[in-house]
Image (cartoon, rainbow, N blue to C red):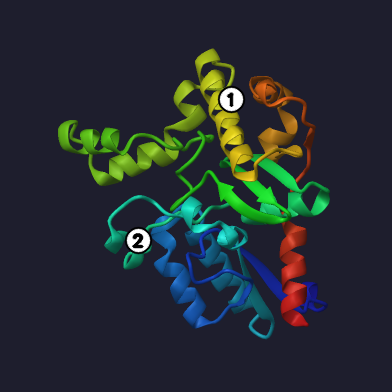
Amino acid sequence: MDDYAAADAVGHRVVHGGARFVEPTAIDEDVIAAIEELRPLAPLHNEPALQAIRAARERLPDLLHVAVFDTAFHATIPPEAATYAIPRRWREEWGIRRYGFHGIAVQSVTAQVDAERLVVCHLGGGCSVTAVLRGRSVDTTMGFSPLEGIPMRTRSGSLDPGALIHLLRNRGLTVDELDHALEHQSGNTAFGTLDDPLGFGVFTYRIAAAVAQMTMALEGLDLLAFSGGLGENNGLVREAVVGRLRFLGDFPARVVPAHEELVIAAAVETALA
């Protein structure tokens, strides 16, 4: 306990907060139960977060524990960008909508730049592209789950739902097999490495197409920012994406490292105030 003697609170990153959690939230048993309910929507992330929360609360029971949600930054996305064209019951009773992710990272990038119309390409294990207008998210590529959007390291990104129905109905895949393939055997991994010309082309094409979509949402582009391990360190990817977007005219592009820990720390400090 001596290592934590000076601590006042503990901040926890939680990927999926659904529609309920749109700001940093003090953790209690009700909050833990709500995060558990959302676990199937972000299985790679919410379960480890819950494990860390339980361990930290057991080790440091007298401190304030605060959950900071990746989805919260995207609560400002307007209905036309957040809504799927699906049956009303699915939308209104079952909560099927676009939530967006990587919000903590995008918020960090946004705080570091002076750009009214900003597009953030956060490229790492997970990948997303987000439109930020005057500091507020107005569209992003990830949706109901972190699977939607551009291809990622092992995730497929968006694909025709009809293909998934076909695989389930006609190729004998189970739901668990399909889930595993989309989460762990797809994306850039499906091509071996990014050195594969087709895989590189698919990846950079989809990123550039997403940037063009986000530019439409912003009605222009003042800055294109690259963050995340891949976005910050792979110049070939950045060059290929920017090259595909020359039709937009001249625009600045730069690397802006994401410092999620600082956003979480600031959120916890606010909760303590």
Say what secondary structure mark 1 lies in. helix
Q: Position of residue 192 (x, y in %)?
A: 50, 22
Q: Position of residue 243 (x, y in %)?
A: 68, 20
Please tell me whether residue 86 is drawn above or below residue 153 in the rendered image: below
Task: Point out which mark residue 204 bears.
Answer: 1
- Identified at 58% across, 22% down, the residue is 194
Q: In terms of secondary structure, where does tag 2 sit?
A: helix
Does 59 sit above or below residue 248?
A: below
Q: Residue at x 69, y 72 (%)?
A: 10
The residue type indicated by label 2 comes to: Arg
Please identify the quadrant where the C terminus is shown.
Answer: bottom right
Q: Which quarter of the picture shows residue 212? A: top right
Which circle's residue, 2 or 1, is located before the other in the chain? 2
Label 2 sits on residue: 91
Residue 126: x %, y % from top left:
56, 42
Residue 112 in view: yes
Residue 259 seen: no
- Left or right: where does residue 254 sit relative to residue 80? right
Horizontal relation, residue 2 to residue 78: left or right: right
Q: Say which mark, if any, is on residue 25.
A: none
